[in-house]
Image (cartoon, rainbow, N blue to C red):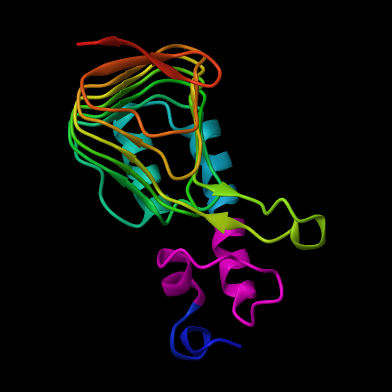
């Protein structure tokens, strides 16, 4: 057991980017948050009929208030919720999925199209360690636009004013003021 495991809880270690393992002595605490988040997401998606209700219920899931200038269209999915940070004047369209165990930060004025997937977690290539979760945060900088059906992979920063084209799979940082497209996404235009 590492020194950091002895002196911090599982959530602090996750925040620090340490791998998440099922044999962690605090794993039950993590599992309890996941179970709560799944239950609250199902309730939100089934019953929230007004934008204020969605903001309120998603605020409960993520553990912090969401600014009234931010709009989220359900259904919206997350597996953990506690490591999502949303700025002001953010727009998130229908059917988005945020896997936030590694952390997802969305700055002000970001637009996210329908069916976008942000995943801040991965697994080791080693088949004997495949159930471990590797955590790498995603950062979407101010005024970025993520097109419909795009996928942003762990550890990616999308730069200020950048555009991710619909359907792109982004595995590397996106420079500010650029447009990326394709699989894997590549810069196709500078703004």
Q: Residue at x 81, y 55 (%)?
A: 127
| Quarter of the image where the N terminus is located | bottom right
Q: Is residue 132 in the magenta section? A: no
| Quarter of the image where the C terminus is located | top left
Residue 137 at what x, y percent from top left? 41, 50
Task: Classify 174 as above or below 130.
Answer: above
| Res 114 visible | yes
Q: Nearer the viewer, residue 167 or 9?
A: 167
Task: Classify 96 as above or below 55.
Answer: above
Q: Is residue 13 in the magenta section? A: yes
Residue 75 at what x, y percent from top left? 51, 27
Query: Left or right: where does residue 121 sit relative to residue 146?
Result: right
Q: Nearer the viewer, residue 17 or 100?
A: 17
Q: Nearer the viewer, residue 26 or 191?
A: 191
Q: How many numbered marks does the figure carry?
A: 0
Quadrant for residue 189, please give it. top left
Residue 150 at what x, y percent from top left? 49, 20
Q: Nearer the viewer, residue 56 or 92?
A: 92
Residue positioned most to the right: 128
Q: Residue at x 51, y 17 (%)?
A: 149
Task: Classify 133 as above or below 99.
Answer: below
Q: Which residues are magenta?
A: 10-36
Task: Classify 149 as above or below 8.
Answer: above
Query: Left or right: where does residue 125 sit relative to residue 68?
Result: right
Q: Residue at x 51, y 75 (%)?
A: 10
| Res 98 visible | no
Residue 138 at what x, y percent from top left? 39, 43
């Amino acid at each position: 057991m590492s020194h950091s495991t002895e002196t911090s809880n599982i959530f602090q270690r996750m925040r620090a980017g340490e791998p998440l393992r099922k044999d962690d002595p605090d794993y039950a605490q993590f599992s309890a948050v996941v179970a709560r988040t799944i239950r609250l997401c199902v309730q939100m998606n089934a019953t929230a009929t007004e934008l204020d209700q969605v903001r309120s219920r998603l605020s409960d899931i993520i553990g912090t208030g969401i600014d009234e200038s931010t709009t989220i269209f359900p259904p919206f999915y997350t597996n953990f919720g506690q490591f999502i940070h949303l700025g002001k004047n953010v727009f998130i369209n229908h059917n988005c999925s945020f896997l936030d165990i590694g952390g997802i930060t969305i700055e002000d004025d970001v637009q996210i199209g329908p069916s976008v997937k942000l995943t801040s977690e991965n697994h080791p290539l080693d088949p004997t360690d495949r159930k471990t979760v590797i955590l790498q945060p995603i950062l979407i900088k101010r005024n970025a636009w993520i097109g419909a059906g795009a996928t942003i992979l762990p550890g990616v920063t999308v730069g200020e004013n950048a555009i991710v084209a619909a359907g792109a799979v982004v595995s590397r940082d996106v420079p500010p003021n650029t447009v990326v497209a394709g699989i894997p996404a590549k810069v196709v235009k500078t703004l």
